[in-house]
Amino acid sequence: MNKFAKLGLAAVTAIGIAAPAVAETELTMYYPIAVGGKLTEVVDGIVSDFEAANPDIKVNAIYSGNYDDTRVRALSALASGDPAQLAVMFSIDAYDLIEQDLVMAFDDISGVDKNWLNSFYPALMANGNIEGKTWGIPFQRSTIVAYYNKDLFRAAGLDPEAPPTTWDEIISMGKTLTKDGTYGLMIPSTGYPYWMFQALAIQNGKEVMSNDGLTTYFDDQTVIDTLDFWKSLSTEHGIMPEGTVEWGTLRQAFLEGKTAMMWHSTGNLTAVKNNASFDFGVAELPANVRKGSPTGGGNFYVFKETSAEERAAALKLIEFMTSPEQAAAWSIATGYMGVSPAAYETEALKKYTSEFPPALVARNQLEHAVAEFSTFETARVREGLNNAIQAALTGAKSSADALKEAQSAAVRLLRDYQ
């Protein structure tokens, strides 16, 4: 049992002895469990702490797979009349949720503290701030970071404290590290290929979408060149496997020494820390024209079909889970970022990051971060981009042809919103 659960159990027991309480408000919260670590236990512990402090509120946490699974399950429940008051879903789902009139702006919830809305890192709020209102509150948030095996760096004669900072260094160091069944680098191209591609495009100096959700730039020559570069890491330079690299098994491949470097979510940090049998490092992503990573992960949303009492209870839960102390404990337990500057001023997180500096890398990278890819019709537009990336990486199509097809499809899907 983790410390959250122990604290929650103790508090619940103490309250129960003093005066049994019956919850007056019941909340159903859909929550994605998609990447490393025992996140279910951690979230259960936080919920237990909240219920101990708020015995009039009962929280039913429904764990529902990855972000896409969570959106489907939560919206299916709403459509069938099952109660659901809040969820952590993709930060990039905001446009579609607003378009479907399913969620409400936090600004419109009675009693919301404007200072609280302004307390989070601006880069993490970018996907949730739309047309002057706040629709999502950051919680399970990340950037892409570069994990690298310092032992393999040493064995190859490379400085273990100097990971690649440019694309040219990726290639040169990757070639030095590729040997004896170990690749120099793996970038996952299943699961969330658009996310990795957006990082590469940003580094190459070009965004793949506008900031109003209405326009994509997939067929821009710089974007095409970016996909060609990704493919060249395997076909030309030989530092990465040809074809696709699986998101779900990449962390294990890194832990087994099958790759010296991997790009992955900071949400894997604690799992890597707990399971690596070698000295490893974490670095910001390298630059070509500029440094950069998209943000990633989930936001809290409050569904529109809720009573005033349910909204107030949901707001109280979200405020509790994003408080500096809880955000700090969450970051330590999972590797995800503390979502506010105040989280990093807590004694717990200051102590942890002083002892384990890699926990600061994702936060520090926010200086160069941009909003994660998001448009109206996000799921369908994103699917077209994902398919284009995989078609190019597997050699089924050229980068130019694949991305031009994805752009044409995106234009058709977005036309009505313009």
Image: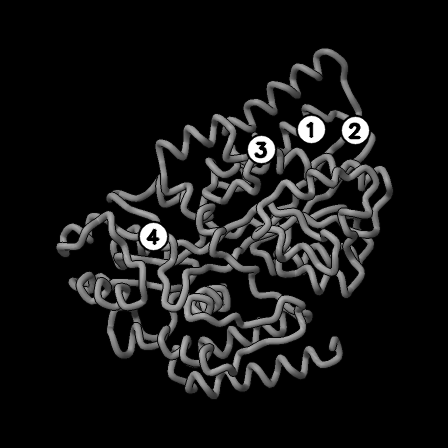
Q: Residue 95 falls in which quadrant of the image? A: bottom right
Please, what secondary structure does the residue beneath circle 3 have?
helix
Mark 2 and mark 1: Cα distance apart in space: 9 Å
> Pointer 1: residues within 10 angstroms few (<14), some, or many (20+)?
many
| Residue 1 visible to the viewer | no
Q: Amino acid at mark 4?
A: Tyr
Q: Quadrant of residue 66?
A: bottom right
The picture places residue 379, in percent across and down from the top left corner, at 63, 69
Q: Is residue 9 above or below residue 341?
A: above
What secondary structure is found at the residue carrying circle 4?
Answer: strand
Given contact means CB atoms under 8 Å apart, are the residues at marks 1 and 4 in contact?
A: no
Mark 3 → mark 2, Cα distance in angstroms:
26 Å
Image point 31% across, 63% down: which residue? 166
Separation (CA) of disc 2 from disc 4: 45 Å
Q: Nearer the observer, disc 2 or disc 4?
A: 4
Q: Is residue 257 visible?
A: yes
Q: Sequence order check: which comes first, mark 3 or mark 1?
A: 1
Q: What residue is disc 1 on? A: 51
The residue tagged 4 is 147
Residue at 72 percent across and 47 percent down: it is 86
Q: Which residue is mark 2?
A: 23
